[in-house]
Amino acid sequence: MSELKRTQLYNAHLAAGATMVDFGGWEMPIQYPSGIVAEHLYTRKCCGIFDVSHMGRLLIEGPERLKFLQHVLTSNAAALTLNKAQYCIIPNENGGAVDDAYLYQFEEDRYLLVVNASNTDKDLAWFEPIVKNYDCKIRNISGETISIAVQGPESGKILAKLAGVEEVTEPARNNLSILDMEGHKVWVARTGYTGEPIGYEIFLKNEDADWIWNRLMELGAKPAGLGARDTLRMEAMLPLYGDEMGIDEEGNEMPIFGLALARFAVSFDECKGDFIGRKALEKQAAAQTAFREKRGTEADLVELPKRVRPIALKDRGVMRHGMEVFYQGEKVGYVTSATMIPYYKTEGEGAEAKLLEETGKRAIGIAFIRSDIPTNAEVEVDVRGKRLKAVIPLKHVANNVPPYVIPVIAQ
């Protein structure tokens, strides 16, 4: 008997021919017979579905739920209104990340906090001594519900057909709704981890797992595993706890403002008060702004020694996690996530860009490097003892022109 945890969709994955692996104590699909490349491309062109039921789902209830969240999260939970969600980070006093998470308000009297699967127990242990000081409680409902990420240009149309509506949520990201889909209650969020301009995450009761999975596939969605989820999020520069946040390869805590996303995840609004890590984060934020505006100093390097940046290989080869990065002959950091990632070639630019049928592959990823390395700087990556030329681009993709993600090829 396997000691690994399994989601309600385990048998559906086996039926679809999935290759199952251990992922943070869960037996999860890494890929299906079509392979990671095909799953990545289908998500970018049509609609991929990902079982994310292993993620931790915590309900925060009680009179002082908001006060508690304001203290333990970096985001301004007071700005969250009904049917809205926000990305947030669980900070420690040093300005490091205990975890990153998403906060949802589907109902007036409670919040849903979704945390990383492998960190669920750790996060609950972190919250336990703190929540005792507030008139609220945390309830772990991970085992009572399932969650599926429905991502890609066709995702909204597929869910709208199931619900019999024109739009399943308001168009902008982070909007929520609760819908009836063919007699089943579905909580729908305009969120996701693939970088898609159109994508959703849905929550259902356990007993509805097989129905929703099968119906999504009948309407044109295809299952995708952890492999494609990883290449999609890398391409979109979305951080993974343990790689781009947490503890670095040298055993040092990675600062939250090493992430570009921190600008959207951290609030210094007065109504938050003195939340955990605020003083350290204020110093990091000032340093990040200085580097972004190209006026960073040695003092800023002390507060924010390294940042998470995109990296693209110019020479032939493949980057992998842990490979050292050099700038002007000096080691300045390392690759946190990278591989060969597929993409659709395009015709035209900006809003006029169109995806072609022709595809390519590129060696891109994410690096944790010294904060003062300029954008478009040429660097070198030690690939199996050979230093290969690479560049630090502004980004790998543009996702601000729906419905497609447009690749940005580094020069």
Image: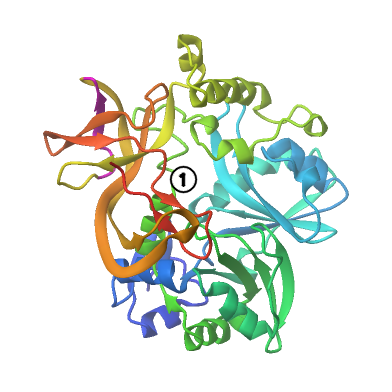
Looking at the image, residue 179 sits to the left or right of residue 6; the answer is right
Q: Which residue shows up at 58% across the image and 66% down it?
A: 200
Membership of 323 in magenta stretch: yes
Tell which residue pokes out farthest to the right in this image.
63
Q: Position of residue 179 (x, y in %)?
A: 73, 77
| Range covered by the magenta-colored residues | 320-328
Camera-side residue: 354 or 220? 354
**Apparent side of residue 362 relative to residue 348 in the rendered image (left or right):** left
Q: Is residue 395 left or right of residue 332?
A: right
Q: How is the image coloured?
A: rainbow
Residue at the spot x=56%, y=51% of the render?
121
In the image, residue 218 above or below residue 155: below
What is the secondary structure assignment of the residue under circle 1? loop
Residue under numbered circle 1 = 239
> Pointer 1: residues within 10 angstroms few (<14), some, or many (20+)?
many
The image position of residue 260, as x and y in percent, is 51, 37
> Which quadrant of the structure image shows residue 92?
top right
Q: Is residue 362 above or below residue 377?
A: below
Which quadrant is the C terminus positioned in? top left
Viewer-nearest residue: 128 or 393: 393
- Quarter of the picture holding the N terminus: bottom left
Is 286 one of the magenta-colored residues? no
Q: Quadrant of residue 321?
A: top left
Return the x and y of residue 361 as percentages of the image width and height.
25, 58
Kindly identify the residue that appears in the image at 70 percent across and 81 percent down.
165
Q: x and y percent of residue 130 in the render?
A: 72, 38
Q: Residue flagged by tag 1: what amino acid is it?
A: Pro
Residue 218 appears in the rendering: yes
Q: Using the rendered image of the protein, determine whether residue 30 is visible from the camera's viewpoint.
A: no
